[in-house]
Structure formats: C-alpha cells, structure tokens
Image: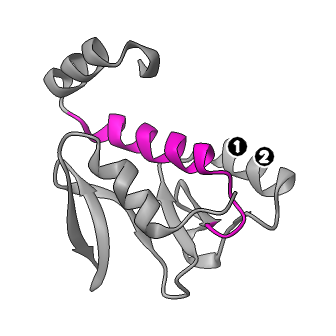
Amino acid sequence: MAMTFEAVRAFAFALPGVEDGTAYGHPCLKAHGKFLTRLWDDGDTLVCPGVPFDEREMLMEAEPDTFYLTDHYRNYPYVLVRLSQVHPGTVERLIQRQWRATAPKKVLKAWDAQHPETA
C-alpha cells in the first residue's frame, strides 16, 4: 500500500510538462514551470499544494496518520502526506489535480482527448 517518491516521480513524469526542479533549495517536481510537489527532508513526507482548507481538514480528521500539517503550511492550501501510509491512488489524484491546475488549456484539451477517463 505504501508509496515511494520514485513511484510519485514515475506517475508525474507520465504527465506532459513535468520536470525535475528545485524549490527553496530542495529537489522538487514542477509542471509547466510551476511547483507540483516535493519530498520533505524526512524522506517520507510529500508536500502537496492545491488542497482546499475544508478538504485538508477532512483528510487529516479521517486519516491523521497519513495527512498532517505544520504551522508553516497552516495558512496555505497545502497538506503533508506520509508516503509510507497513503494509498497510491490518493497521491495520484492530488498530483493530477495540481498538474491540471498548472497546465495550459491546449495541453489539457489534448490530454483529455487522449485520456477521457481522467477528464
């Protein structure tokens, strides 16, 4: 059930426009030049942006061993995800949603035409 950062990278690199980058001196993944996700210093936590506050609260309440927050992220729509605890499909949905938020309309249209099940 657990996921690794290498599995996250493999999934993300299947999406157009994803590349390695850095954010605040840390390796990260970027989509279309914008921050997509990064592995935290503990090697087990994925930093996931684009998670609305109400959804984040629900995730943390439902699975406190998997989803959590530090004060640093409290005022931002981010959630921290323990890869050793999370279901891979959940991470894939979070990554794909953030990727969709960064993708140009033309890229999304082409992707959705080729992958109608994800549209």
Q: Which residue is mark 1?
A: 54
Please tell me whether residue 84 is drawn above or below residue 14 in the rendered image: below
Give the camera-side residue of 21 and 3: 3
Give the camera-side residue of 106 and 56: 106
Please tell me whether residue 118 is drawn above or below residue 20 in the rendered image: above
Indicate left or right for 81 with 110 as reference.
Answer: right
Three-letter code for the amino acid on which mark 2 is drawn: Met
Residue at 82% across, 63% down: 64
Q: Secondary structure at mark 2?
A: helix
For the N terminus, give its image quadrant: bottom right
Answer whether labels 1 and 2 touch (C-beta < 8 Å): yes
Region in magenta: 82-103
Q: Which mark is residue 58?
A: 2
Where residue 117 sits, quadrant-wise, is top left
- Provide residue 20's location: percent of width, then percent of height: 21, 66
Indicate left or right for 59 with 47 as reference.
Answer: right
Q: Secondary structure at mark 1?
A: helix
For the C terminus, give its image quadrant: top left
Q: Main secondary structure of the magenta part?
A: helix
Please tell me whether residue 1 is drawn above or below residue 58 in the rendered image: below
Q: Is residue 52 visible?
A: no
Three-letter code for the amino acid on which mark 1 is drawn: Asp
Q: How is the image coloured?
A: one colour
Residue at 49% across, 79% down: 40
Please tell me whether residue 68 is drawn above or below residue 15 in the rendered image: below
Where residue 45 sits, quadrant-wise, is bottom right
- Provide residue 21's location: percent of width, then percent of height: 20, 69
- Provide residue 84's location: percent of width, then percent of height: 67, 70
Indicate left or right for 13 with 107 as reference.
Answer: right
